[in-house]
């Protein structure tokens, strides 16, 4: 479980950093769809960490949803073609894999 918690924390941080950099892009309007899914990913990773940390019996359900949202975030980031989004996508995919294993 600790590995999944660590990956969720890394993902949360990567998404926060990516979101901040997306907001500084020249054409922010093209980043809107990515920004929206980044926010969802940040929130679900935070929730997953909390549920796993307290050993909630609902952790598996939250991790399943976290994996799904992390995959969506990775796909959205890959479409943006920026270095920060590419890095974020890689981290999201790792988190999704760990969350799937937890679920």
Image (tube, rainbow, N blue to C red):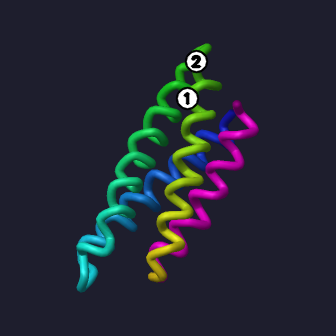
Checking the image for residue 62, the label placed there is 1
Query: Residue at the location (66% across, 40% down)?
Result: 99
- Residue at left 32%, top 71%? 31
Give the residue furthest to the bottom. Answer: 26
| Quadrant of the image containing the N terminus | top right
Answer whether residue 50 is magenta in the image: no
Q: Give SS at disc 2.
A: loop
Quarter of the image for residue 44 reads: top left
Q: Which span is picked out in magenta?
A: 83-103
Residue located at (56% from left, 35% from top): 65
Camera-nearest residue between 54 and 101: 101
Overall secondary structure of the magenta section = helix
Q: Which residue shows up at 60% across the image and 33% down it?
A: 63
Q: Residue furthest right?
A: 101
Decide if residue 96 is on the left or right side of residue 15. right
User: Marks 1 and 2: CB-CB under 8 Å?
Assistant: yes
Measured in 3D between alpha carbons, the distance from the residue under mark 1 to the one under mark 2, in whole angstroms, is 6 Å
The correct choice, above or below, for 63 with respect to 45 in the image is: above
Q: Which mark is residue 97?
A: none
């Amino acid at each position: 479980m600790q590995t999944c918690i660590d990956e969720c924390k890394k993902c949360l941080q990567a998404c926060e950093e990516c979101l901040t950099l997306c907001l500084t892009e020249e054409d922010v309007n093209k980043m809107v769809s990515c920004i929206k899914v980044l926010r969802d990913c940040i929130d679900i990773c935070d929730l997953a960490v909390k549920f796993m940390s307290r050993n909630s019996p609902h952790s598996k359900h939250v991790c399943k949803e976290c994996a799904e949202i992390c995959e969506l975030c990775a796909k959205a980031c890959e479409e943006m073609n920026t270095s920060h989004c590419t890095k974020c996508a890689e981290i999201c995919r790792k988190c999704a894999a760990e969350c799937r294993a937890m679920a």
